[in-house]
Structures are given as structure tokens and as C-alpha cells.
């Protein structure tokens, strides 16, 4: 978890859904600073509106390096009060160009999403079955 700094919440992992969706930190975002630095066997779920408050160029470089290193990255877009996804469209398109599934997901589907990710199943197929539209990279049309 992070706001303007990374926060270790390991002791709260007994309920991951509550941890991810029920924890409120101070605000602000330095996505670049929060990204994983040891990528071995890592699934990185970035829950964000993708508005980078730090260094956007470095954030994009780090995400690309993580993907190149084999990290499975999933980006869940923030939802507004009406439940619609909100995001920096440029950063969302950039992540999609790296073949990172970038989409919004409701709380009720999150555990199933994580099971699919952990099981290394096809996230695009899962999203299609649930009528979730993934951001499509320019290369994929």
C-alpha cells in the first residue's frame, strides 16, 4: 500500500480483500516509488487512477522493466462514486501497450480475478466472460 510512501501491511494479510479495498491512506501518489524492486515470482496488482504524482517517465520505465523481468502486472482502475472507471488515459494506454490487463473490477469479482491471476490463467478470457472491457493497446487495434 502507498500514498506518498510505501506502507508495509503484511500483518493484515489475513483478509486480503478487506485490506485492499478497506484501507484508506493519506492520499497523493508516487506510483514510481511504490513499484516492486524484486520481481521474482511476483504478481503486481496496481489499483490506481494512474495519475502519477511523481516522475511519470520513471514510473513507465519501471513498469516496462518489471514486465520484461517476468512480473505479472494487472492494473485495476479506480472507480468514481457512480462505479465508473476513472484514469489517466495516457498512462492506461501505455500499460495496455505493454500487454498489461488494465480495467475496472468490482469488489465482488476481485477474489475470482486474483484466483485467475495466481493460477496463471488467461485474464483476457476471464474479463470477456464477465463482460469487462480491457484497455486495448494500439498494436491490438
Image: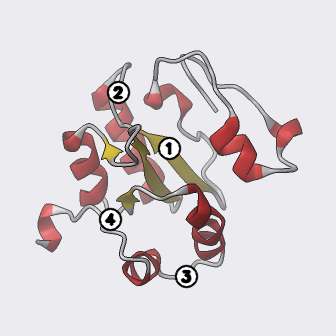
Vertical placement of residue 10 versus 24, above or below: below
Secondary structure of the residue carrying numbered label 4: loop
Mark 4 is surrounded, within 10 Å at the Cα level, by few (under 14), some (14 to 19) or many (20 or more) other residues, namely: some
Residue 109 x, y percent position in the rendering: 57, 66
Label 3, on which residue? 121
Gap between marks 2 and 4 measured at Cα: 20 Å
Secondary structure of the residue carrying numbered label 3: loop
Q: Quadrant of residue 24?
A: top right
Mark 3 is surrounded, within 10 Å at the Cα level, by few (under 14), some (14 to 19) or many (20 or more) other residues, namely: few
User: Extreme front residue here?
Assistant: 82
Residue 124 x, y percent position in the rendering: 39, 77
Dot placed on the residue nearer the N-terminal end, 4 or 1:
1
Q: Residue at x 37, y 80 (%)?
A: 128
Say whether marks 4 and 1 touch (CB < 8 Å).
no
110 relative to 46 in the view: left or right: right
Dot placed on the residue nearer the N-terminal end, 2 or 4:
2
Residue 64 x, y percent position in the rendering: 36, 49
Q: Residue at x 41, y 55 (%)?
A: 104
Q: Quadrant of residue 67?
A: bottom left
Q: Residue at x 59, y 15 (%)?
A: 26
Residue 115 x, y percent position in the rendering: 66, 73
Dot placed on the residue nearer the N-terminal end, 1 or 2:
1
Vertical placement of residue 5 versus 128, above or below: above
Label 2, on which residue? 52
Dot placed on the residue nearer the N-terminal end, 3 or 1:
1
Quadrant for the C terminus, please.
bottom left
Discs 3/1, front = 1
36 relative to 59 in the view: left or right: right
Q: How is the image coloured?
A: secondary structure
Q: Which mark is residue 99?
A: 4
Amino acid at each position: 500500500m502507498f500514498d506518498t510512501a510505501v506502507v508495509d501491511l503484511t500483518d493484515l494479510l489475513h483478509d486480503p480483500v478487506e485490506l485492499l479495498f478497506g484501507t484508506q491512506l493519506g492520499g497523493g501518489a508516487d506510483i514510481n516509488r511504490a513499484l516492486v524492486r524484486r520481481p521474482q515470482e511476483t504478481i503486481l496488482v496496481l489499483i490506481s487512477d494512474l495519475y502519477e504524482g511523481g516522475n511519470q517517465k520513471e514510473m513507465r520505465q519501471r513498469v516496462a522493466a518489471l514486465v520484461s523481468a517476468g512480473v505479472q502486472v494487472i492494473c485495476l482502475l479506480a472507480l468514481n462514486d457512480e462505479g465508473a472507471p476513472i484514469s489517466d488515459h495516457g498512462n492506461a494506454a501505455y500499460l495496455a501497450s505493454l500487454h498489461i490487463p488494465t480495467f475496472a473490477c468490482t469488489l465482488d469479482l476481485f477474489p475470482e480475478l486474483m484466483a485467475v491471476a495466481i493460477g496463471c490463467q488467461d485474464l483476457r478470457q476471464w474479463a470477456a466472460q464477465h463482460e469487462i472491457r480491457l484497455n486495448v493497446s494500439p498494436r491490438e487495434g
